[in-house]
Amino acid sequence: MAFFVEVSRKASKGQPELERIDLELIAIGKKAGLTFSEINEFRVRDLLAYVEIFTGSKKEKPRMATQEDIDRLLA
């Protein structure tokens, strides 16, 4: 006996709904200036890592402020 469960694909709060993740990945690669053959060479996680490096969107950890930083802020 088998039954089917409908899976809800609603986006979480603040996130767009991704119905065509394949097209989203192609668009991301093209925005990064890659050709279709170059995109085809990447695995999904490698493409996302490449775009993250390309855009510089990887979040850096905060660092402790130095005295120079404080002087610059208050000067």
Image (spheres, rainbow, N blue to C red):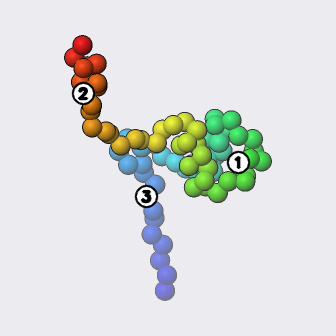
Q: Which residue is mark 1?
A: 39
- Asked whether, in this view, residue 72 is left or right of residue 18, the answer is left
Q: In the rendering, at what x and y percent does residue 31 appear? A: 63, 35
Q: Can you say whether 75 is above or below 30 in the image?
A: above
Question: Quick one: label 1, few (<14), some, or many (20+) residues within 10 Å?
Answer: some
Q: In the rendering, at what x and y percent does residue 21 appear? A: 58, 50
Helix, strand or loop for disc 1: helix
- Residue at point 24% right, 20% down? 71
Q: Are marks 1 and 2 in contact (CB under 8 Å)?
A: no
Helix, strand or loop for disc 2: helix
Distance of label 1 from label 3 (alpha carbons): 30 Å
Q: Which residue is mark 2?
A: 67
Question: Quick one: label 2, few (<14), some, or many (20+) residues within 10 Å?
Answer: few
Q: In the rendering, at what x and y percent does residue 75 appear? A: 24, 13
Mark in the foreground, 1 or 2: 2
> Label 3 sits on what residue type?
Ser
